[in-house]
Image (cartoon, rainbow, N blue to C red):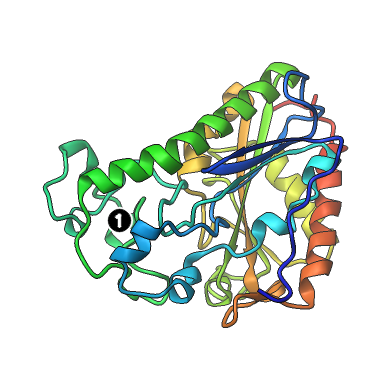
Amino acid sequence: MTGTPTLTTGPQLCEESDPAFLLRRAAPEGLPPPTPLVFASPHSGRDYPEEMMAAAALDATAIRRSEDAFVDELIAGAPEQGAALLAARFARAYMDVNREPFELDPAMFADELPEFARARTARVAAGLGAIARIVSEGQEIYARKLTFAEARARIERAHRPYHAALARLLGEAHAAHGLAVLIDWHSMPAAAARQSGRLGSCDMVLGDRFGAACSAALTNRVEAELVRLGYRVARNTPYAGGYTTEHYGRPARRTHALQIEINRALYLDEARLEPTAGFAALKADLATLTQALVAADWSSPR
């Protein structure tokens, strides 16, 4: 696609490539990470396996509306600054790694699901379970019912490797620094940004599960830096954090998880799914935010 940025690697970094993810460390594997920071981009994957598209009623362009397009590119410089970076390769519509692995919608399947996979969450009801039923405009993705075997294969191929890598990164950070800080990066449609509460339209939403997933100090620090950079920031509305922040955020154990949603209007032509002129400025500002987090005094109380 014309104008698409490219994720690059520096010679001092350690890159680990897997069908499910791209992992870039700030130090070679086996050496302690230089900071407790781990950045993740779970929804920017652009791989649509053939078997998925063969079952789809929509073309790839329509399904791509569910991507957090180019978020991985916006934070691509983080490893050079000291933060590990994990980016999903598979498309969100294929397997949403920001969901419970078996958060499935029984109505999507031809066979009866095991009881443990018969999710009754609000996300499933909205058509956005681990395997999405719809894209953001409410269009049905599939032309036929799926099978539980297909769902299990996607979980083993995409969800399990991604989270094994993420858990390993957080464990390494905690072992080296006595704490781990996960920033889970996302983007939101401009229409959703206009529903962010009393502020009206906003530029960023910080989701800390209303304080349950990370320390107030971390959320305050990120918000203050973004406001200093000129961004309008909301908290927890309309996004308080998903499976990743809920699963990994344990501030009492000094593992903190914060979700950041970026208004796509800042950097993306949502109709054409191409970066706009605002992409470079936003990327530079996120690098400034990253540097502020790298320089933070992590010895402060949790």
Element at label 1 = helix
Quadrant containing the N terminus in the rendered view:
bottom right
Residue 127, percent from left and from top: 31, 63
Quadrant containing the C terminus in the rendered view:
top right
Judge whether 297 appears above or below 142 on screen: above
Q: In which quarter of the image is residue 167?
A: top right
Identity of the residue drawn at 60% across and 65% down: 69
Q: In which quarter of the image is residue 273?
A: bottom right
Q: In this view, does 97 lie to the left or right of 53?
A: right
Residue 42, percent from left and from top: 55, 49
Identity of the residue drawn at 76% across and 66% down: 231
Report the front residue among 28 and 190.
28
Residue 108, percent from left and from top: 21, 59
Identity of the residue drawn at 11% across and 47% down: 112
Q: In this view, does 2 lie to the left or right of 144?
A: right
Judge whether 216 appears above or below 66 on screen: above
Residue beneath disc 1: 124
Report the front residue among 289 and 7.
7
Report the front residue among 50 and 121.
50
